[in-house]
Amino acid sequence: MKIPPARAEAFLAKPDEACLGVLLYGPDSGLVRERARALTQAITGSLDDPFLVTELSAADLREDPARLADEATALSFGGGRRAVRLRGAGDGTTKAVAGALELLTGGEGPPPSLVIVESGELGPRSSLRRLFEGEDGAAAIACYLDQGGGLERVIEDTLARHGLKAGPDILGWLARVLGADRGVTLSELEKLALYCGPSGTVTLEDCRAVVGDGAAHELDDAVYAAGGGDAEGLDRALARAFQGGASPVSVLRAAQRHIQRLHLVAGKVAAGTPMDAAIKGLRPPVFFKQADRFRAQARTWDPNRLATALDLLTEAELGAKTTGHPDRLICQRVLMQIAMAARHGHR
């Protein structure tokens, strides 16, 4: 069965006792790991008890395909339900996972173990994803990148646990430079909280001093240069971002978020909403220092051209991951293509 996003956290906190296996998949590997840990904790009460928790990799199953079934059906020493985590799974592990779930289905009483499968992005035709979505005794949960209001809530809640508050502009700034990976997001916020101490309030200076070690700060310059048709500025910003450690995929995703926000505003304006009202409704809000640039770009682009730009960015990310071509070159080309389209829109 497929667990919708609105039910995911409640399911992870208290999974159905009859559930045999859970697939956690998606582009946010940090969120996949975090949810696997939460599910393991909920089932066993521990993350590292060797009698209750077993961790396997896809490589382990290539060497011994039956090992997952053996671990899943093994009884715990001293009682209690076990968790068997399979990392790096893909369609190549579907047969082994299906065999383990079948053996668990045939047993009497509650299953001795919960099989927790961790994977990356899986398309609708994926055999592994179809297995979990089609079984009543199994569950599939997609782990998408934190974006928009969801990411803002993650940031706000994390800071609140440390007794810190951040204004809307600061939340917006953090949301732009974080979100590509839940694990990285939480790690950066922990560093920020440690840096701020018990001050109670997070400032932009605090954020710039700590978050992203400088690389993330160049992403804004890169995506705004692309959206504004500034080819020279784009070239400089990309060089600084890559030099600071930003990956091409993180740059492409930052560009996607920026174009998506422009597309949302452009669509509302086309439907009759005033420009300022459409921009004000964005969550997280536009950072005040970028407000004029964002407004200018929202006037330049129309919804159809923004939709085309989003398609180009999606294709570029897929190409950077799968084609074997230099990912930096793919990133540079598509952003320059968008910059040229933006420059044409100014004419």
Image: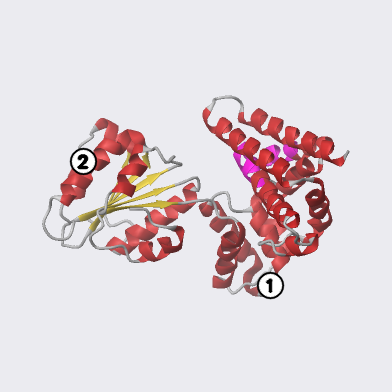
Of badges 1 and 2, the one in the foreground is: 2
Q: Describe the element under mark 1 as helix, strand or loop.
A: loop
Nearest the eye: 16 or 193 = 16
* x, y percent for residue 160: 58, 72
Say whether residue 207 is magenta.
no
Q: How many marks?
A: 2
Dominant secondary-structure state across the stretch colored magenta: helix
| Residue 247 counted in the magenta span | yes
Q: Residue at x 72, y 36 (%)?
A: 335
Residue 33: mark = none
Which quadrant of the structure image shows residue 253?
A: top right
The boundaries of the magenta stretch are 238-254
Which amino acid type corresponds to the residue marked 2 in the rendered image? Gly
- Residue at image position (61%, 30%) is 327
Viewer can see residue 20: yes
319 relative to 242 in the view: left or right:
left
